[in-house]
Amino acid sequence: GQTRWMRRGEEGGASGGGGMVFVGPPGVLPEEVTPDDILERGVDEGCGEAGPEGAVARALLACPGVACLLLAQTPAATALSLTRWGVPGVASQALDGGGSADASALRGGAPALIIPGLGVMAAGGDVGEAYCRRRPPPPPPPPPPPPP
């Protein structure tokens, strides 16, 4: 299996801003990948321009608040994606909408997508949010007004 990390390009959106994909080498387990093993590719090169993975990545990276995608194509994630019942609280989407259904599921608050035959994909504003569903803390409240 393979794990991929994707981020939005500088100008926003994977297509307009040239989103990037960070890919571990094929045949190496994710826990065995070192920083030197990571390959950086454009979304089309790393996911396949015409393939469903690229369409999903482009659609999701174009969503507000999404700047990072994590895709786990491990044997367990792929097997889970093919189960009939899914996982409670995690959206499961077929790839027939070009990514629009996936974007809608994530906008609806799903923490991750199970994509049949592909694996599990999580999205967030950064790696921490996508991986741990950790959101940055809200800004502190404004100070109280001075007494009269």
Image (spheres, helix red, strand yellow):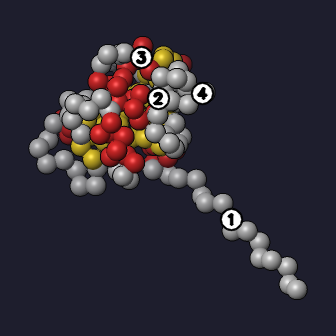
Residue 96 in view (yes/no): yes
x, y percent for residue 25: 40, 17
Which numbered tag is attached to residue 6? 2
Mark found first going from the N terminus, 1 or 3:
3
Please tell me whether mark 4 sits on a helix, a strand or a loop: loop
How far apart marks 4 and 1 lie (CA) works out to 29 Å
Say whether residue 86 is left or right of residue 13: left
Given residues 112 and 10, the one toward you in this image is: 10
Q: Quadrant of the C terminus?
A: bottom right
Mark found first going from the N terminus, 2 or 1:
2
Which numbered tag is attached to residue 101? none
Mark found first going from the N terminus, 3 or 4:
4
x, y percent for residue 62: 46, 34
How far apart marks 1 and 3 lie (CA) works out to 40 Å
Contact (Cβ within 8 Å) of mark 3 with mark 2: no
Query: Which residue does the image show at 45% across and 48% down from the upper left?
Result: 132
Q: Amino acid at mark 2?
A: Met
Neighbor class of circle 2 (other Cα within 10 Å; few <14, some 14-19, many 20+) is many
Given the current orientation, which residue lies at the most extreme bottom position?
148
Query: Which residue does the image show at 77% across and 72% down from the upper left?
Result: 143
Neighbor class of circle 1 (other Cα within 10 Å; few <14, some 14-19, many 20+) is few
Given the current orientation, which residue lies at the most extreme left position?
84
How far apart marks 4 and 2 lie (CA) works out to 15 Å
* Residue underneath mark 3: 44
Q: Amino acid at mark 4?
A: Glu
Which numbered tag is attached to residue 11? 4
Given residues 76 and 82, the one toward you in this image is: 82
* Residue underneath mark 1: 140
**Camera-side mark, 4 or 2:** 4
Say whether residue 120 is left or right of residue 31: left
Q: Amino acid at mark 3?
A: Asp
